[in-house]
């Protein structure tokens, strides 16, 4: 590398050729080209922003209230039975006290309920703990409970209701939606962009013309990669900042969180570009790219927790969700942005992404076509 | 006349695709500073031969040296001293001509001024235009500009005038002659015999992957005439193309 840079001004001659110069020239050309390509801008910025706007203003949508049952609570009582019947309340059981505390603080569980039979009495004592992380749902739960407790069949059996609220971080819809949209943006940039560019460069013989120059194949791939990653990161930064300043997206550690998110974005887009390389090799013409790309992107778009938490999916669907790379990128993004974790804390998610990356590129090397 | 020096030497070149032999035992030399024409019908093996010399394609057997470099072992060195214009090649999408020239300058590691390159092929007015928006003749001139970026010793032009109108074609001949006069060797393929006759110092006729004749256009014509050949129709002092040029003028229509 060092030698390359020193010789970069020598115009010709066998030893004066600089791969770095060639790579950067390609990166610059590719970046210019991407910035002028309407589809790249639409997929990377416009789509995610539209979804963020829609969900940012819609705020929530489906009303499900997750209520944790405090360990040790009586479960065979009419109170809990009635709660289940409302259809609005999802009961969360079988977690330890510590796990519940965390969930409650993040607002993943909207409230905790603890029911005990009063000593020497036929009635029950109900203890409800709300969280400020989920105030609106707490409010709904409160009115649901009030209705229940004044129900004539239940009223005699409930002796007292004690309510309290713990202080948690406020978890807004944007905190869930934005990382998901960011992941989706990276996925489409990586897959569609890479697939289209390499197929069209191959078909219009641009790559063949490049091969008539002293440029190395690795320079072509790396140059293209630098441009695409650069573009994806600018898009990501734009989405994060817009979300933060206009929709109150939570960035726990400020700039550090942003940098961590961008590092995750880089990893994500590199992995997703692998899909693009594969598709450019398989597709016979440009019209085949969208359907093949959609096979890759749509399931991840829907099942990787882009819009809904994958915990909301039926049990049989969850293993599929947990197999997709975008799930782990989204998961890591949310943990970093909202919970303020460092990259080392999401090493498991990063590892899964790396495994996907290795697998994808192993296939890409086999199916990618230069000519 | 001094003895010409061969800058490209092709010996017994063979190229086989599975069961099809595209090139069978071609041998020829291209001399320094000449315009050398490879002529022949479609599928005769002209493009394959060019692409093997340009190091873009592997050969099956034979020996080729370009300015002393072997295509087998010194492909990188060869690429640095040649300029290549491919038949029907496109350019990076969404970039204008100046940006494309900058890209190629980077790829060749050449330090050039893009506008000067465009001036060489009279495209300075189109500097901000996209390649796709150019006319056929402009596209070919731009392609030729990209072959000159690394100040090559040899340029290869694969059917550069196909599909051009008479004005653009004549203009391209002038450009190619200028490039040769500036010291660059030119290897060209064409289907137009009038073009080869006007432009080329020597031509090789390729048929089914073999060279069936190689000489100066003058000598080849004399040989045919000496063998007793006569045109069926008396040749007039001008042809229809002369009429076309005379009526529509010599200027380019672009």
Image (spheres, coloured by chain):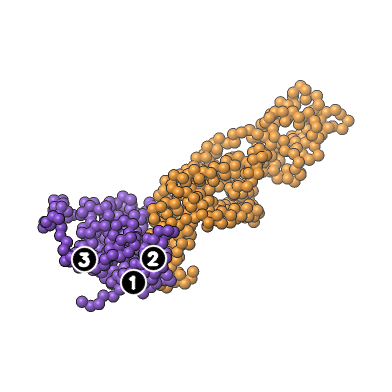
Chain colours: A orange, B purple
Kindly identify which numbered label has been placed on residue B14: 2
Left or right position of A100 against B45: right
Residue at left offset 51%, top offset 43%: A294
Residue beneath the point at 20% across and 62% down: B198
Dot 3 alpha-carbon crowd within 10 angstroms: few under 14, some 14 to 19, many 20 or more: some
Q: Which mark is residue B9?
A: 1
Q: Dot 3 lies on which element?
A: helix
Question: Crowdedness of circle 1 by 10 Å Cα count: few (<14), some, many (20+)?
Answer: some
Whether residue B186 is visible, yes or no, is yes
- Residue placed at 86% from the left, 29% from the top? A121
Separation of marks 1 and 2 at Cα, in angstroms: 14 Å
Across and down, in percent, residue A233 comes to 51, 52
- Of residues B133 and B154, the one nearer the viewer is B154
Which is more N-terminal, label 2 or label 1?
1
Marks 3, 1 in one chain: yes
Residue B72, disc: none
Q: Nearer the viewer, residue A57 or A34?
A: A34
Q: Quadrant of the C terminus of chain A?
A: bottom left
Residue at (21, 66) in percent of width and height: B220
Residue, far front: B228
Kindly identify which residue carries mark 3.
Answer: B220
Q: Are marks 1 and 2 in contact (CB under 8 Å)?
A: no
Residue that protrudes farthest toward the right in the picture: A120
Q: Quadrant of the rendered structure where residue B239 is?
A: bottom left
Q: Chain of mark 3?
A: B
In the rendered structure, the residue with mark 1 lies on which chain?
B
Residue B34 at what x, y percent from top left? 26, 69
């Amino acid at each position: 590398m060092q030698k390359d840079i020193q010789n970069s001004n020598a115009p010709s001659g066998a030893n004066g050729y600089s791969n770095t110069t060639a790579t950067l020239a390609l990166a610059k050309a590719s970046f210019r080209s991407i910035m002028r390509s309407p589809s790249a801008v639409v997929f990377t910025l416009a789509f995610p922003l539209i979804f963020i706007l829609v969900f940012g203003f819609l705020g929530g949508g489906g009303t499900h209230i997750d209520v944790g049952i405090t360990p040790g609570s009586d479960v065979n009582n009419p109170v809990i039975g009635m709660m289940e019947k409302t259809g609005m309340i999802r009961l969360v059981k079988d977690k330890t006290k510590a796990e519940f505390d965390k969930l409650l603080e993040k607002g993943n569980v909207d409230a905790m309920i603890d029911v005990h039979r009063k000593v020497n009495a036929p009635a029950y004592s109900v203890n409800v703990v709300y969280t400020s992380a989920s105030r609106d749902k707490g409010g709904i739960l409160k009115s649901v409970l009030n209705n229940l407790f004044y129900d004539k069949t239940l009223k005699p059996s409930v002796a007292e209701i004690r309510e309290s609220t713990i202080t948690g971080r406020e978890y807004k819809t944007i905190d869930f939606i934005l990382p998901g949209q960011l992941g989706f943006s990276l996925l489409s940039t990586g897959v569609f962009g890479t697939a289209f560019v390499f197929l069209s460069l191959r078909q219009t013989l641009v790559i063949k013309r490049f091969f008539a120059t002293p440029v190395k194949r690795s320079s072509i791939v790396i140059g293209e990669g630098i441009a695409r990653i650069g573009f994806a990161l600018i898009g990501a930064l734009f989405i994060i900042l817009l979300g933060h300043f206009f929709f109150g997206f939570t960035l726990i550690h400020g700039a550090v969180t942003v940098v961590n998110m961008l590092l995750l974005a880089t990893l994500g887009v590199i992995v997703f570009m692998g899909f693009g390389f594969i598709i450019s090799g398989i597709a016979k013409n440009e019209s085949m790219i969208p359907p093949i790309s959609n096979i890759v992107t749509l399931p991840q778009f829907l099942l990787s927790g882009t819009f809904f938490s994958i915990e909301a999916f039926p049990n049989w669907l969850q293993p599929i969700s947990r197999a997709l790379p975008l799930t782990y990128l989204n998961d890591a993004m949310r943990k970093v942005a909202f919970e303020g974790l460092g990259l080392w804390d999401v090493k498991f998610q990063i590892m899964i992404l790396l495994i996907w990356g290795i697998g994808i590129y192993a296939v890409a090397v086999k199916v990618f076509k230069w000519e | 006349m001094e003895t010409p020096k061969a800058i490209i030497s092709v010996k017994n070149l063979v190229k086989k695709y599975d069961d099809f032999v595209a090139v069978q035992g071609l041998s020829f030399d291209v001399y320094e500073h000449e315009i050398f024409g490879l002529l022949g019908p479609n599928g005769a093996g002209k493009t394959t031969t060019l692409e093997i010399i340009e190091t873009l394609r592997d050969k099956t057997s034979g020996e080729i040296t370009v300015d002393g470099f072997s295509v087998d072992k010194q492909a990188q060195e060869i690429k640095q001293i040649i300029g290549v214009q491919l038949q029907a090649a496109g350019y990076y999408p969404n970039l204008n001509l100046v940006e494309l020239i900058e890209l190629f300058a980077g790829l060749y590691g050449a330090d050039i001024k893009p506008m000067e390159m465009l001036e060489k092929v009279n495209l300075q007015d189109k500097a901000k235009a996209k390649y796709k928006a150019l006319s056929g003749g402009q596209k070919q001139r731009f392609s030729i500009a990209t072959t000159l970026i690394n100040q090559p010793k040899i340029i290869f032009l694969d059917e550069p005038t196909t599909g051009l109108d008479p004005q653009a074609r004549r203009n391209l001949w002038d450009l190619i002659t200028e490039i040769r006069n500036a010291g660059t060797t030119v290897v060209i393929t064409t289907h137009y015999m009038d073009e080869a006759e006007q432009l080329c110092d020597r031509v090789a006729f390729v048929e089914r992957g073999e060279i069936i004749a190689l000489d100066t256009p003058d000598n080849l014509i004399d040989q045919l005439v000496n063998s007793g050949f006569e045109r069926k129709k008396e040749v007039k002092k001008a042809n229809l193309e002369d009429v076309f040029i005379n009526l529509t003028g010599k200027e380019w229509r672009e």
